Image (cartoon, rainbow, N blue to C red):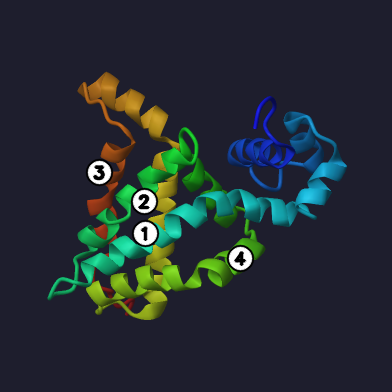
């Protein structure tokens, strides 16, 4: 298409940037329409509501990431033994980095959006993800549970959310952390290097045995 980007894509691009920077709750439709240079009727026509727009923004990434991640994890099941947690988490690296093909900086943007969804208690997003990507999500959870069978399901629920919080915070702070690492330790890391650094930490945290409070 020659000339200006189509209206729907402009709305998605503007909403994505604002959602990642300001959060879902703090971003109004009027702010989005102003940045996208469209009228409110265009948003209603293409998406119907703000909730549907939020889902559409995330779907651009989830439609790419979830099937690819599930395929990578299933590949691990071809081995005669259960994959380690390090291997399972490492299998997500390529699907995450491939999001940079969706748009420049897509890996970090996606994780920021995902983090916003949990921080702001966007319950409709949990419904959306489990409804549309539940099978892929189950592939991941089952693989992790099989690799750490000593962790009860309820405890695994908490640990996987702690894991999500870890990667979201790390990637959201990547620029600042890189500056500190370069200044204090002469170390230079790209996005993949940072993800690989955090994986052993996450894997160890998920696998540590449950201790009694008594």
Q: Is residue 148 visible?
A: no
| Residue 152: quadrant of the picture | bottom left
Q: Is residue 125 left or right of residue 105?
A: right
Of the two numbered discs 1 and 4 in the rendering, the one whose residue sits closer to the viewer: 1
For disc 4, the marked residue is 128
Q: Earlier in the sequence, mark 3 or mark 1?
A: 1
Label 1 and label 4: CA atoms lie apart by: 18 Å
Of the two numbered discs 2 and 4 in the rendering, the one whose residue sits closer to the viewer: 2
Classed neighbour count for the residue bearing mark 2: other residues with Cα under 10 Å, few (<14), some (14–19), many (≥20):
many
For disc 3, the marked residue is 197
For disc 2, the marked residue is 95
Query: Label 1's element?
Result: helix
Q: Earlier in the sequence, mark 1 or mark 4?
A: 1
Classed neighbour count for the residue bearing mark 4: other residues with Cα under 10 Å, few (<14), some (14–19), many (≥20):
some
User: The N terminus appears in which quarter of the rendering?
Assistant: top right
Label 1 and label 2: CA atoms lie apart by: 6 Å
């Amino acid at each position: 298409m020659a000339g200006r980007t189509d209206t729907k894509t402009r709305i998605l691009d503007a909403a994505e940037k604002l959602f990642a920077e300001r959060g879902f709750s703090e971003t109004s439709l009027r702010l989005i329409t102003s940045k996208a240079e469209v009228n409110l009727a265009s948003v209603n026509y293409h998406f119907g509501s703000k909730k549907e727009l939020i889902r559409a923004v995330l779907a651009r990434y989830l439609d790419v990431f979830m099937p690819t991640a599930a395929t990578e994890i299933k590949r691990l099941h071809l081995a005669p033994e259960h994959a380690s947690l390090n291997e399972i988490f490492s299998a997500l690296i390529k699907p995450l980095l491939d999001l940079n093909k969706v748009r420049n900086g897509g890996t970090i943007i996606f994780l920021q959006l995902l983090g916003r969804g949990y921080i702001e208690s966007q319950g409709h997003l949990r419904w959306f993800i489990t409804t549309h990507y539940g099978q892929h999500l189950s592939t991941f959870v089952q693989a992790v549970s099989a690799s750490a069978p000593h962790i009860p399901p309820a405890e695994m629920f908490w640990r996987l959310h702690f894991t999500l919080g870890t990667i979201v915070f790390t990637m959201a702070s990547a620029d600042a952390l890189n500056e500190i690492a370069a200044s204090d330790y002469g170390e230079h890391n790209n996005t993949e290097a940072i993800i690989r650094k955090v994986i052993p930490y996450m894997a160890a945290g998920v696998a540590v045995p449950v201790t009694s409070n008594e």
